[in-house]
Image (spheres, rainbow, N blue to C red):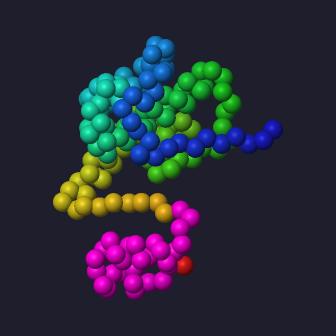
Amino acid sequence: MALFAMLFPGQGAQYVGMLSSFFLKKNNIFKNTFEEASDCIHDDLFKLVQEGPGIKLNKSHYTQVAILTASVSIYRFWNDKSGRIPSLMSGHSLGEYSALVCSNSIKFSDALKIVFFRGKLMEETTINRPSLMQAIIGLNKKLVKNACLIASKKKNSILGKYKLS
């Protein structure tokens, strides 16, 4: 039999209304998992995910618990439906915590506390420090370098000191 892996998403996969089709079916797995998370963070995570506001959902500490809770809910649902047990689990950034929970390496409640705190720290580090991150795939390196130099508005940009290879 071929190996089967499960990969969990990171921050940025959240949106108001996510998982609504599962909630509409009154699936207790999703309801119970979101209630468990809500109790842990002392906020109604289900309401936030379903109704917003999006500005609150996009705050890192809420985003991170929402993605973790959604991932764990989906995995629990998968198991309930006798889904194939993955041989490997991994996650992109925040998704690593989902993989740890679903592989029984850490408790869900512990992961919720960690990612809620992690999100708060991430927010604090960006206060009064405007920042942006982009993924650049498949573009010519010289074009990317020139775009960064132009955007930085600095003749002696740090990118000018190093060769992109």
Residue 128 drawn above or below residue 59: below
* Residue 100 seen in this snapshot: no
Find the residue positioned furthest to the left: 128
The residue shown at (39%, 28%) is 17
**Where residue 101 appears, x then y in whole percent?**
50, 37
Please tell me which residue lies in front, 97 or 14. Answer: 14
The reply, left or right, for residue 128 in relation to residue 107 is left
Is 68 magenta? The answer is no
Residue 80 drawn above or below residue 115: above
Indicate the quadrant containing the C terminus: top left, top right, bottom left or bottom right: bottom right
Please tell me which residue lies in front, 149 or 109. Answer: 149
**Where residue 68 appears, x then y in whole percent?**
43, 37
Please tell me which residue lies in front, 134 or 105. Answer: 134
The residue shown at (33%, 81%) is 157
Quarter of image, res 151: bottom left
The reply, left or right, for residue 148 in relation to residue 88 is left
